[in-house]
Image (spheres, helix red, strand yellow):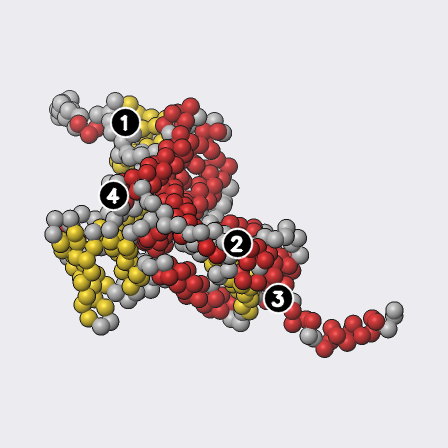
């Protein structure tokens, strides 16, 4: 009989098991983009301990490579276009002198002016612990960032998305840009070839065209194919009218160098192969979720090519972990990430069962004219609700639009029974601002009777929405029953 067990010397700790510090915050946020920052700031404001892990720039894609720089570039292009188009106002038009390095300096200055709101210094002052390192799950409840282990009560993954680079033969042999590098340009492209006709591709194509570049957009299906075709056609006609070549139903077959700095793109069209020579290539062919280095399998988190699988409450299969924004496979907009952040905070802080409602999220495309939308489009509404009514009102019938010579476009309302608002799409000047009131109506369950009763300042373009709502009740004026009632009422003086 053995009285003593044999002694085995413990194995030395592996380097990856040695940590300089182990943190136990209430919440660990992975990713310092718009959604992640919103969660961190709000939680810290309630006195909750928060650790925020970010391996790249604070502010994420929106501040550094997306919304902010693109809108700054679009604004510069819009001003250049206005200078060329002044004649209809009785002002002699001029061809603007584009100092491209100065334009890009303007873009960087806009980023710099907003960056302090997203900075390490600000969030540290709020009480958030910032770790600048790559985060990866070690197990279901531990994240490792550099040499620090984080065992939080809850985790929020907000790592966003990155440009998707298609497997085009020869693309890796040339220098190409994505939205993450295009704003580093210092020399104006002579001929910019944009691969992808989605919102990012078309917005930047129009902006560069207005700033003096020749631009060709190549799209395998239909440009702006997520938009109601009736409405996208108006915006695309304007973009084409400014000289941007938009090639639809055209696929990129291969790419090769042309000379020392040029590129040649071979495309397959309905009539055969065509070569397009350019100076620069911008790849805008979609986005992919940033999940590769997270070690999701170790955390028992499910993922698809579209993103992390979450419930309506944005919770993953691992009950400790939530995912928000682009990485959760939803609509890829900054305001969606912020919306997700608000829902997750209700669950994290107050245990409230808040669920997302995807079709209630408005979105906008910042072409000129703009496109904005909320709810269902005509086809989707007809499929879900059967018979629907379509109401339109043109900008050309609006006095403010006439005064400002912005008469392209119209509002389109998709309406169900009893004036229920099923969907709204606006194409035209200021559409991204005008959709806000319809977003409020949607969220509060208002109907067309409510929208027709709005008192709108005159003259404003918002009146087109009211006029479209009033049009819903126009058939009542021709009703024999209503007219008969009026005749009876007149008998009483």
Q: At which x and y percent is residue 476?
A: 68, 71
Upstream in sequence: badge 3 or badge 1: 1
- Residue 486 located left or right of residue 388: right
Q: SS class of the residue under badge 4?
A: loop
Q: At which x and y percent is residue 110?
A: 39, 36
Foreground disc of the pair 1, 4: 4
Few, some or many C-alpha atoms within 10 Å of disc 2 (few <14, some 14-19, many ≥20)? few
Q: At which x and y percent is residue 467?
A: 61, 61
Numbered disc total = 4
Name the quadrant of the C terminus: bottom right
State the residue position of label 1.
148
State the residue position of label 3.
471
Foreground disc of the pair 3, 4: 4
State the residue position of label 4.
187
Upstream in sequence: badge 1 or badge 2: 1
Upstream in sequence: badge 2 or badge 4: 4
Q: At which x and y percent is residue 115?
A: 38, 32
Rounded to the nearest angstrom, the CA distance separating label 1 from label 2 is: 58 Å
Name the quadrant of the N terminus: top left
Foreground disc of the pair 1, 2: 2
Residue farthest toward the right in the current orientation of the protein: 493
Rounded to the nearest angstrom, the CA distance separating label 1 from label 4 is: 42 Å
Upstream in sequence: badge 3 or badge 4: 4
**Residue 61 sits in which quadrant?**
top left
Q: Residue at x 25, y 22 (%)?
A: 20
Query: Where 93 sits versus 253, above or below?
Result: above
């Amino acid at each position: 009989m053995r009285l003593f067990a044999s002694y085995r010397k413990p194995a030395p700790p592996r380097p990856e098991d040695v940590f300089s510090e182990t943190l136990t915050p209430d919440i660990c946020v992975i990713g310092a983009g718009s959604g992640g920052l919103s969660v961190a700031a709000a939680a810290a404001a309630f006195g909750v301990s928060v650790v925020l892990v970010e391996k790249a720039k604070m502010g994420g894609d929106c501040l550094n490579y997306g919304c902010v720089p693109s809108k700054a570039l679009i604004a510069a292009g819009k001003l250049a276009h206005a200078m060329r188009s002044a004649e209809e106002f009785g002002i002699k038009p001029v061809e603007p002198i584009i100092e491209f390095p100065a334009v890009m300096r303007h873009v960087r200055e806009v980023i710099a002016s907003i960056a302090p709101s997203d900075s390490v210094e600000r969030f540290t002052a709020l009480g958030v612990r910032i770790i600048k390192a790559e985060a990866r799950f070690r197990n279901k409840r531990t994240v490792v960032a550099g040499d620090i282990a984080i065992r939080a009560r809850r985790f929020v993954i907000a790592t966003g998305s990155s440009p998707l680079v298609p497997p085009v033969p020869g693309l890796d042999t040339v220098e190409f840009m994505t939205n993450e590098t295009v704003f580093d340009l210092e020399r104006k492209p002579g001929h910019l070839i944009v691969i992808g006709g989605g919102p990012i591709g078309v917005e930047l194509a129009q902006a560069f065209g207005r700033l003096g570049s020749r631009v060709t957009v190549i799209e395998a299906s239909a440009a702006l194919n997520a938009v109601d075709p009736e409405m996208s056609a108006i915006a695309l006609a304007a973009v084409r009218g400014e000289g941007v070549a938009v090639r639809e139903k055209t696929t990129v077959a291969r790419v090769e160098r042309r000379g020392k700095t040029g590129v040649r793109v071979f495309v397959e069209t309905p009539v055969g192969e065509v070569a397009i020579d350019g100076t620069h290539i911008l790849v805008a062919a979609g986005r992919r979720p940033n999940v590769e280095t997270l070690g999701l399998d170790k955390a028992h988190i499910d993922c698809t090519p579209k993103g992390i699988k979450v419930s309506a409450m944005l919770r993953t299969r691992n009950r400790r972990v939530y995912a928000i924004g682009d990485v959760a496979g939803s609509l890829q907009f900054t305001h969606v990430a912020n919306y997700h952040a608000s829902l997750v905070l209700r669950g994290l802080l107050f245990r409230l069962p808040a669920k997302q409602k995807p079709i209630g999220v408005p979105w906008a495309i910042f072409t000129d004219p703009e496109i904005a939308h909320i709810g269902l489009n005509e086809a989707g509404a007809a499929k879900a609700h059967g018979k629907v009514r379509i109401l339109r009102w043109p900008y050309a019938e609006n006095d403010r639009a006439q005064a400002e010579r912005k008469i392209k476009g119209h509002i389109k309302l998709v309406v169900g029974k009893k004036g229920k608002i099923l969907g709204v799409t606006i194409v035209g000047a200021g559409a991204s601002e005008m959709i806000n009131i319809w977003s409020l109506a949607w969220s509060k369950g208002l109907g067309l009777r409510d929208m027709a009763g709005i008192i709108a300042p005159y003259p404003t373009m918002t009146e087109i929405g009211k006029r479209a709502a009033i049009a819903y009740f126009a058939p009542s004026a021709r009703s024999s029953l209503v007219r008969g009632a009026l005749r009876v009422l007149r008998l009483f003086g």
